[in-house]
Image (tube, coloured by chain):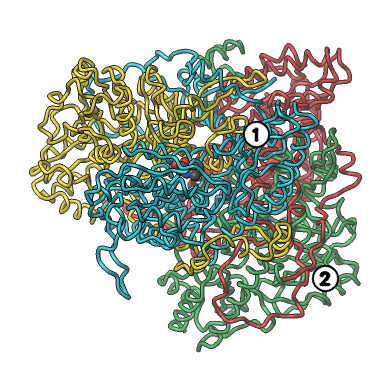
Chain colours: A red, B cyan, C yellow, D green
Amino acid sequence: MNRLEPNIYELSTPGRPSHRFPDLDVPLAELPDKMLRDQLELPELSELEVTRHFVRLSQLNFGIDTAFYPLGSCTMKYNPKVNEDAARLPGFAHTHPLQDTRVLQGNLALMYTLQEWLAEIGGFAGVGLQPAAGAQGELTGILILRAYHKDRGDKHRKKILVPDSAHGTNPATTTMSGLRVVELPSDKRGNVDLDALRAECDDTVAGLMLTNPNTLGLFEEHVEEVIAMVHDCGGLVYGDGANMNALLGVIRPGDLGFDVLHYNLHKTFSTPHGGGGPGSGPVGVSEALLDYLPGPIVDTVEPGDDDLPPLYGLVMPKKTIGRVKAFHGHFGMHVRAFTYIRSYGKSGMREIADHAVLNANYLLAALRDTYHVPFDRTCMHEFVVEGRFEKAPGVHALDVSKRLMDWGFHPPTNYFPLIVREALMIEPTETESKATLDAFIEAMKSIAQEAEDHPEQLQTAPHTTAFGRLDEVQAAKELVLCCRPAELATLEN
Amino acid sequence: MNRLEPNIYELSTPGRPSHRFPDLDVPLAELPDKMLRDQLELPELSELEVTRHFVRLSQLNFGIDTAFYPLGSCTMKYNPKVNEDAARLPGFAHTHPLQDTRVLQGNLALMYTLQEWLAEIGGFAGVGLQPAAGAQGELTGILILRAYHKDRGDKHRKKILVPDSAHGTNPATTTMSGLRVVELPSDKRGNVDLDALRAECDDTVAGLMLTNPNTLGLFEEHVEEVIAMVHDCGGLVYGDGANMNALLGVIRPGDLGFDVLHYNLHKTFSTPHGGGGPGSGPVGVSEALLDYLPGPIVDTVEPGDDDLPPLYGLVMPKKTIGRVKAFHGHFGMHVRAFTYIRSYGKSGMREIADHAVLNANYLLAALRDTYHVPFDRTCMHEFVVEGRFEKAPGVHALDVSKRLMDWGFHPPTNYFPLIVREALMIEPTETESKATLDAFIEAMKSIAQEAEDHPEQLQTAPHTTAFGRLDEVQAAKELVLCCRPAELATLEN
Amino acid sequence: MTYIPHTEAERSQMLTAIGVKSLDELYAGLPAAMRFPDLALPEPASEMEVMEDLQLLSEANLHVRQASCFLGAGAYNHYVPSVVDHVLLRNEFYTAYTPYQPEVSQGTLQAIFEFQSLITFLTGMEVANASHYDGATSLAEAAILSLNHHRGKRTKIVVSPGIHPQYREVLRTYLQGQQLAIVGDESLKHDQVIHIDENTSMVAVQYPDFFGNIHDLEALGQEARQAGALLCVVANPIALGMLKPPSEFGADIVVGEGQPLGIPLSFGGPYIGFFATRDEYVRKIAGRLVGETVDSRGQRGYVMTLTPREQHIRRGRATSNICTNQGLMALAVAAYLSTVGRAGLKQVAELCYHKAHYAAQAIDQLDGYQLWNRDPFFHEFVVRCSRPVAEINEVLLDHDIIGGYDLGQVYPELAEHMLIAVTELNYKEEIDDFVEVLNEQA
Amino acid sequence: MTYIPHTEAERSQMLTAIGVKSLDELYAGLPAAMRFPDLALPEPASEMEVMEDLQLLSEANLHVRQASCFLGAGAYNHYVPSVVDHVLLRNEFYTAYTPYQPEVSQGTLQAIFEFQSLITFLTGMEVANASHYDGATSLAEAAILSLNHHRGKRTKIVVSPGIHPQYREVLRTYLQGQQLAIVGDESLKHDQVIHIDENTSMVAVQYPDFFGNIHDLEALGQEARQAGALLCVVANPIALGMLKPPSEFGADIVVGEGQPLGIPLSFGGPYIGFFATRDEYVRKIAGRLVGETVDSRGQRGYVMTLTPREQHIRRGRATSNICTNQGLMALAVAAYLSTVGRAGLKQVAELCYHKAHYAAQAIDQLDGYQLWNRDPFFHEFVVRCSRPVAEINEVLLDHDIIGGYDLGQVYPELAEHMLIAVTELNYKEEIDDFVEVLNEQA
Ligand SMILES: Cc1ncc(COP(=O)(O)O)c(C=O)c1O
Ligand SMILES: Cc1ncc(COP(=O)(O)O)c(C=O)c1O
């Protein structure tokens, strides 16, 4: 009686009437017979079947709108509904990226303003909105560093320093950019180890990729010194802005000396995560790097005056690294982020950071006695504890995570950063209430107790969800990546 | 660890920042101090709390979009998504009911067309769209009959004949209209008993309320004779159109001689049921009754020509029974029904009825051997079986219903019509596929078997839903009809 | 466009299983001569074409967001927070029906229970039902309750002329089959109090009244009480965000139109009637009531309760025939009130109040216009003009301004009087423009 | 507008629990001089005001539904069935993230699995991933796969000039850090085949190409295969509703832009890149892959699989840095393809085809215009004009017609050539009007 949802091919019935388009209203042209396909294996469902299928599937998910979702490093804050409405306004949703920009001044004004706002928030000279996500922002940034050095004839700068606490995208980006990763250890307080950094600072350094607050949720205590050391050896500093939520209105990376930084609109600026994207990863740069931004970006091409707004246009920065995407980036996300910043406004920025940091420290204070905190100091918007118990050696961070599901919570991030054993990275975000945090604390404490008393309760969790643990080994071994249509449809109409 | 959803007052926290409106941009006026309230016991939640609350609540419901919903007499067909979009178009959603009709010709054209289409589908001379639901359509219709007789000086016609199989709204409507109900028995084949009818047909008959197909899902076999008898004694015939789905493009009640009929847009014409409304219950009438329609209705006030569309206006029928609602009825539902009829078009009407009837007869054919069918003949869009088992006297229709939930199905209608013992009234509708019907048949058969083998499995069902059986006796006894705010908020800001 | 899933193959399998040869055969019992009429309807159309048609029709309207709107008179242009419609679009809410089966309907049931609670607290009463069709029919249902309360022995309903004219029309429509008198609204000058006597079943009054006036109903309540009549107050729910709840005037029943609480104008519907009263009348309330209870597992849950009042049980002896009501609109109201909350509702009320007064004062200062209201008013007020309102409104329309309601249409004594509504959606600038155009038209 | 729930009381309780006196204290470790900058941002605004601003901005655009649109060039104006967005608005879908925790993410996982399946069957390939950012980056990722396949020993990528110019730009951006040559698109006359040699890692071609041409890629595929290079085909997914899948030409990788499959134009994004290939390359695919498995209760379920390929495990040795991809857009594509289904996709493809040919023929007959395509084309074609395209487009705009793409901007040899796209949304009447205005502008 277990009602698993069939897949879309299993739900298909040959010949099922489905969506209907208008009849052809022009004469038939000759078809290129030789080039036509004779099979098209797509499913055939009624609209009710489609609706029911996806509604049922959706119910198998946890989302921010159903559960507390303290997934560290991902800033799962509330996604305001008005943002969704704004992005769907026909005047935005139905504009073609190659239309004459003179009839798209609304879009351009919005993007221009967002560029300005993000630059102001981050302390940068300019911002390019094209990158599609954080990782593409990183690629953009590192290619900018590379182009900058190359332009100056500085050809042997091939080294990118990356702390060992960094997100996997940082080293991967470096390699993609044709540069070499040098990993830096962290010190006992979770900072970049200054001695190790010093030892690497030479004239082959292209730059440092720094996440601040870092992935432990800690503010880099020597950030000014770190940046100065890199600058002094001729390198540039890239900021991974995944954790900008902690800094809004608090401190500007540009003021700290970062040369480039990517923003995650899908984290800091509340655009929805969509089950894994689309994100948006605009990049801010200092004056010296402005000309390298990917393009086009929006600029005023004719100044405005009291009566007329300026005329905006799309322009290619002079020494651009090139396009990183077709068209102009994830405009739909730009609309949402614009709406968000416009709503909170000037004073709201700091309020966001304040409450993100308050919530994280509140949880940390409450959990410190129950869970081992490897780097224990005032955290920023998130913190990392260890999901292991001396008295219950067989219990792992993953078990704690799975057991949290039984309490109705989405688990924290597991096993990242890599420098912490059994890491549980907890980011509550500012939109969660004290009541929710208190319930989470209760769950975490109770689970820790249970780890000792009934470890198997954790090891076999979750118990109350629609699915139990999934067999990842089998998935990788058997590698079924595609539906097998019950009956390969051969009827062709 | 059972996570019941708290109610909205329990979720409230005094002082919680919530939705913000613009600041006042005019000078303050003096407030009428004596008239101000000092307590306002409304909850205070963040938008995330509101969203999460209602999303979680929604998941506790079955709806057409999650499950087969064969609730007899309710025509739970698929609600097309495009209807929802249409009703939300700003040009419809943001029109005020008292605006100058010359700037609302879009609304009026839509309503006029819908009046015409419904009249055509039902075989009537005209249609009024004002009634809010089926029951209000009934009230409208019966008041029209009453006014008609009154107008003709026919003052002693106070009797409304209502078959015993009729829906409760029929007799209730009669009473509300100040008329007297006379109940007619059904014969062995589920028809109105002709002898009983003949006996009542005299000059005190105001009319007959006839549901055809009736609530057994059966077409009234002597419908022409029945109508003629009532007409012959000077009465009029009211049609309860709840079951119009079976007749679309098949037969027109107006052609059969019905004088008045209400349509249920929320049944036949796919407007969503909304967890119990809003519905819409337009009323169609014959030529003789046109002037009695509630108003205003839409009419052309200036004819159109090749270049110009006609000018539509709101007009009050000459001898109108009056308004039954403020404004013009459930316009949002009119838009949806218009969209629906426009989509299916001429040929689609009969296809709807055909497949509704096909699906019902298919189920009936499959279940006939397992469940007792009290009136067993070719049914229309629905049919009624008995949810009782000779070998399992302790099992009731309600138990079958509850057990169906464990199979993922919404139950049929229970205990209606009253003339069938342990009635299970099953209406599959045309939008369900054979595969779904087959699964339902399997469930019904398996449950019948289980009733004999493991009756307690039915009697304690449902087992797999979030809630078990609810205690209705306690609800009626303790009568808690309102949240008790944990703390009566006394802070007034 | 079709939503019917059947394939040709399935259709024939099913016909075979039924034992008939064709679909036509299923209709063998129907009068042959009338079967399968040729309907004069348009051809089927694709979704794309249908949506284009609808788009065009909708664009043939001037909607209030394309203009400045000063029209109210029972339907108000308020801002609906975005989250409300996102809640309504939850498939499980809008594609469910009346929660007959509580085990799989707790979402709807709890939402209605919350709606009842919110209305109870907003009106200051003790109990509220799950909804009526609109403000007008909730007034009619109140009258019926009063008649039943008096067991049919009282045959007079006294209504104030300050009640929305259409509500009074609906009241008369509903009660046309009963032998009773509905009096008190013959003219504006009229004092209803003179009608109140031992035969009076209910006294009904609007708060604020149709002209925006905020009357202290204390005295009227006492008159009604003394005569043993029920006092019914038709209230504007936004006004209750700042004004004394009718319970404080001794109201026995509070009804009203819930549209201002999160429901789009939508050319007049669907809206929602709310209905709140005292505990003692709970068994006489029409419509659905949701009550709290427990399930077989000891969990708190909700069910429809006191159903023996209703038509499906009591049939001809039920006092109302209401069945389908305004479920989804109740959800909208619950979502709206939860979203704006205590502070938000008060803020909206006060924005309306102050903006209306700003507008009234400015218009009153114009030559040719005079504020008619003598009492405190809420967000609507009457202005005496020196020309027909229709003419003024026509000019206003040329300026993309939707002017107020022409009172002369229903109150002969108020020819050339305009009823003007102001809400939080009217910025100062709009008001100033409105005043300026009025000035030009004086 | 704020979405922060904290009350003053809660804030102080929390500060006390933490052991600090103020929020400021939490930042004690931050460089003091720079703390709390005064940001030049607008004041906070209510939702109502924000929405009005956005509405105004959106109305400052001319959108394609207000005009006739004949512009394509990589982004196409197709009809999106209503149901698609209703699926995307399911809160549980759009407010979830990457399904790291499969037990509470089966909805997303199964939807992605279905997306992979649909793309696999549509392209005729053996495996597809969970998405890339867009068509352009999926081409770049294909190139990287080919380089890795050849273990860095081949240093040439041959690209056809018929690939979208912006895709070629992105390819070059992505690979600027590698030592390799990207050749073949120097001019239109150019025959890429001459470049294919033992050093060629990948040969990439578009189908239909940027000018709409449907080329038989059989021969090119053979050339590539002989040289041991991978053949990558950038395909238009709507065209695949009627045309031979690239697998039939021996494609090793099929990538493309999924926007036409249910995603609004949205000024260029978010869209979705799809990526399909042969089983043998599955361990070299960048991005997420969802695979089928079972859970502890024996139920079929889905997980992200082969994760050791990815950056979070392999870090500096990963071949791509992609992390967040286009999850929700994959859902849109899955919903679109499920809704239109086999027959619907074919119908759309054919509508596009026939309408484009009708338009092309009509324009070709005009004086001053000449159809440039010599081969069969799909729904886009090139017209040689006798005036600058920008001038013609300006006049078209006056008639509410959004003209085609000015090819001279990127192909110097195609000055005064317009690339025209026609879809199911262009009715005959629109096409006729377009032709008429063109005629006037000849
Ligand atoms: C610290 C950090 N950097 C980079 C990224 C990559 O961002 P995206 O997933 O948007 O590509 C992430 C994503 O989770 C992250 O947490
Ligand atoms: C046969 C029949 N008549 C009348 C009604 C009343 O219609 P409504 O609920 O729309 O008022 C119903 C409703 O279920 C019904 O089934």
Q: Position of residue C402 (x, y in %)?
A: 26, 49
| Foreground of the two, A243 or B461 | B461
Q: Residues within 10 Å of mark 1 (few under 14, many from 20)?
A: many
Q: Does mark 1's beta carbon lie closer than 8 Å to ligand 2?
A: no
Q: Position of residue B404 (x, y in %)?
A: 69, 37
The answer for how far apart the CA atoms under marks 1 and 2 are is: 59 Å
In percent of the image, x 78 and y 34: which residue is there? Answer: B450
For residue B397, the mark is 1
Asked if C59 appears above or below B266 in the picture, the reply is below
Where, by quadrant of the figure, is residue C322 drawn?
Answer: top left
Quarter of the rendering containing residue A26: bottom right
Res A227 seen here: yes
Q: D331 and A379: which one is in front?
A: D331
Output the chain of dot 2: D
Q: Nearer the viewer, residue A463 or B255?
A: B255
Dot 1 falls on a residue whose secondary structure is: helix
Residue matched to label 2: D248
Q: Amino acid at mark 1?
A: Ala
